[in-house]
Every structure is written in C-alpha cells, then in structure tokens.
Image: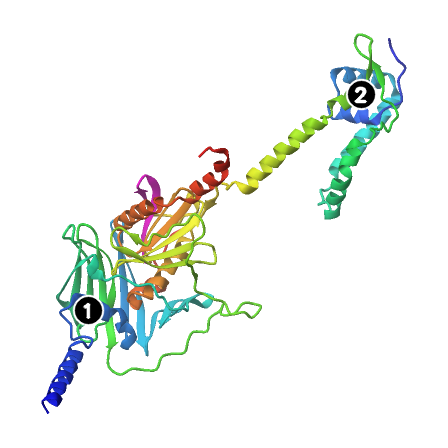
Amino acid sequence: MRRLARVGLVVALVAVGGIVALPGAHADDAEAVLERARNATVREDFSGVVQIEWRNDGEWYTAKAPVTGTGGTVQVGEGTRKAEGRDDERWIAGVSGWQAGWDEPVRGDVPSPSAHWDLTLGKADPIAGRTTVVVTATDPDTGIERLKVYCDKDTGVMLRREVLDRNGRVVRAVGFVDVKKLGGSRAAAPADPVTKQSRSKSGEKVDPTPDKVTDLPDGFDAPAKVPGGYVLAGRYLRDDDIVQLYYSDGLFGISVFQQAGDLDWNGLPKGGNGVDVDGADGRGYAVAGGTVLVWDRDGVTRTVVSDATVADLRGFAQAFDDRADESPGVVERITDFVLGPFGWR
Amino acid sequence: MNREPTKPDEDVLSAYLDGECTAVETAWVEEQLAASPEMRAVLDDVRAARDAVRALPLRDAPPEFWEHLLATGPERADGPVEDPAGAPALVAAGDGAPVDLAAARRRRRPSRWVAAVAGVAAALVIGAVVFVPQEQSVTPPVAALTDAHAVRSSLQDDAVSALVPLAVRGGFGR
C-alpha cells in the first residue's frame, strides 16, 4: 500500500510538472517565450494587417500587407505580391502566378539565443489591442539592447519585432498594426497554391529547393562558426551556381551568397552606401527585404542578407572573411596548382 | 640591263596591289605598267577579282573543311612550290643584278622552325586562355537573393515577419 502511495505521488508530481511545462506556463522564461513564438503562427489561426518599417539614410519607410493564418497555413500579402507557407513548404506569387520557393525540411540546428545574448522578459504596452510581453536581447559586451520581440500574452504569437542599432535606436520593425482574429476556433487549411513551374516542359517535377550540399565547389568557404555567435545551419547550391549559407545566432539569421568572380559594380541596384569591409569595397542597402551587403575579395563576390543592421553585417562580413582566410581560397589554390610544378610558390 | 616586259604574273600584281612587294619589285612592276597596256589590263582584272572576292559575305566553313585542311596541310607545305604563272620573273635590280621574284617571295615566307615556334606559342596562349582562370565579373541578383533569404529565414524563424518582405513593395531601385 505504501508502495502504491509512492507511485501515486510520483505520478502526481509528473502530472504537475507536465502542466508547468505546457506552452505558455513559462511566461517568465524569455527563451521559452521566443521558442513558443517561433511556432505560434502554425498553432493559432489569425488575421490582420502587418506593417514593416525600416530606416535608410535617415528616412523611415513603411509598407503594409494583410496576413492570415488558417489551419497552419500562413498567407501574407495580396494580389500579385503575396507569399504563403505551410510546414516546410513556401510559395511566392508574382505577376506570373505562384512559384514554389521551398519544399523540403531544414535540419540545421539553430543555437540557443541565450548562448550569445542576455535575454530579459518584461511587460509591454498593448499592440493592436492585444496584451503583450516583450523579450529584450542585450549585447553582453556593450550592455546595449539590440532586439525586442513582443508576443501576445495569450497565444504566444509574435506581434512585433524591433531591431535596434548599436546606439539602441530602432532601425527596423515588423509587426501587427491591426488584429482581427487571434486564437480561438481553427479553420481548415486552404488548398496548396497551384504553381507555375511545378513541372518542366518535359513533364519532370521541378525542385524549387536549392540542393543541400556537404562539400562546396572549390573556392567557396563555409566556416562552421563565425565570431559573434553565428552557427552554420544550412548550405545549399542554387541552380545558378550561387552558394547559399545560412547562419543563425538564435535571434538573427544571415544568408551568405557566394559567386565566383569579381563584383560587377555596374550591375548592382541603384542606391545603397559604400561600406568598407576590412579594406575591401562593399555596398550596403537597407530595403524592405532586409539589410544587404555586397563585396568581393580574392575573386569571390559575396552578398549577405539579414534583418540585422548594416554595421552588424559589416562585422559579420569581416569575421566571415577572416575565417575564410584560414583556408586557401580559389585563387590561391589555382595559383598553387599552376605554379607548383615550377617551384614558384 | 633592261629586260623586255615579261609575261604578266598575277601573283606579283596581286602582291603589288596588297602592298607586299619590295621596293625593287614595286619599281619593276610600275615600270612594266607604264610600258605595257597588257600589263595594265591584267592589273585591272586582278584588282576587279580581288575586290569581288572581298565583297563576298563571310560564311562558316563546314566541319569537314577543317578536317580536310588539317589532313592535307602538311603535305602541301612539304610539296613542291609551283609558280602557276610559270614566271618566277627575273627582274633587274637597281644595280642591274637579276632578282628572282618568286625566290624572294619564298624567302619572305616563314621557315618551318618559325612556324613551329609560332605554333607552340599559339598553343601556350590557347592553353592559358582555356586553363588559367580569367578575371570574370559577376552581378549578384541582389533582389532575388534577398527573397531567397526571406524564404530560408521563414523556415526557422517566425514565418509572418520573415515572409512579409516578399509581399510588400520597397525593394531595390534600378
């Protein structure tokens, strides 16, 4: 009987522990709130309007788009400019119709945000009429706040994300400005979009996802870690032979695109500002899609994209180049190959 | 010593028109042209034929042409050099010494070793072009790469905030 009582006590404790571990119960845990927000739009139905704001050359720019979440499918935008996501699939619509953007799971691990950032959780003002909590990420080296993520207290859905520069000023934000529905009953997911290029003219299925690769072509570098807390979470080879690397520090994702060849400056989009990347000329842009930095070094042109600031991307770029320098580049390897037999290395 | 005008050599006249004659040859040709209506008539014919050929449109040679050329080229180079006009004209140089025009033209042709050196040099140049990486310029499709980042980012971060950039205007200017 005493044994039965002990078993009952253990079962009760496990049950209580299970309740405490349910999503939402760890509201005081900043990292748990972030993790909950990461998948909340899949768990909850919602509709409203999101606005993206970004600062460029001292000017603020804004753009709005309707957004819905239905049965796990997220739809953003309308008309000929919209995007949709469900599980590991992504579609993008343009004037020519829907095109598949991704259709495979990603397996790269994203590091814990607290590994690089000091995270705190606090109360915040309501957003679009919803009660929120805010997770603030502070640079442990400078003590300056660099990111704020506002989440709906009830559902955990992220309602606003603010990126702050190295002076603590907001330079980019995206979030709801109107919430019509959030939580409650769920509807069935809409049918998948009919994509234009799902099959080639010969009838073969077109794979929209870039190839995951283990070994990169000669001359391209993919350091597993980049100083600043960034961890390589995926490497891909696109159909246009551009290598894409995806890094994350748990809060910011950065894509590094690499092409063989020197940068053709005349082909770059207008605008942007000159940026020095550790002695190499580069150009930085701040647009709705994020912050972009383009530069070339040693015969390789690199384009990095993120929602981090240009200054942060510049620091990442320098750290990436330093790590890349630790392995011989394409020019160095070819030079060795050509001149090696003559003893001219 | 002056010679009677020889039978007009079309090759010599063609070389004259192309500016390939030496000063001695040029002087001789012009002397003959001044003295011989027949020579002037031949020169006009050569000039007309030359202009007509140059006016022809350029066409790609069929593949078998090059195979044939490569197969027969060395034999022709090794074979006897004929003078179709049969007139390797001996002309009087300024000092009266006879000059063999055909022999002089043969002397101007590159010798075999020069050709061999030139061939090796050409092979090296081709090899350098083919095998040594050339400095090429690339234009990153910045807007497309930005979209690609948004797609990839939406798979591991909040999907709404990552996908919004794909649905709004505010891209790059051109």
Relative placement, left or right, of B3 versus A16 is right
In space, the residues marked 1 and 2 are separated at their CA atoms by 96 Å
Q: Which residue is mark 2?
A: B103
Q: How is the image coloured?
A: rainbow
Q: Position of residue B32 (x, y in %)?
A: 84, 17
Amino acid type, residue under disc 1 in the picture: Ala
Q: Residue at x 38, y 52 (%)?
A: B173
Circles 1 and 2: CB atoms closer than 8 Å:
no
Label 1 is found on which chain of the structure? A
Amino acid type, residue under disc 2 in the picture: Ala
- Residue B155 counted in the magenta span: no
Q: Is the residue A299 above or below the residue A52 in the image?
A: above
Q: Nearer the viewer, residue A185 or B156?
A: B156
Per the image, label 2 sits on a secondary structure element best described as: helix
- Residue A281 counted in the magenta span: yes
Give me the disc on residue A32: 1
Determine the main secondary structure of the stretch shown in magenta: strand
Q: Is the residue B87 above or below the residue A269 in the image?
A: above
Relative placement, left or right, of A203 versus A258 is right
Instruction: Please report the bounds of the magenta region as a residue range.
Output: A274-288
Indicate the quadrant where residue A253 lies: bottom left
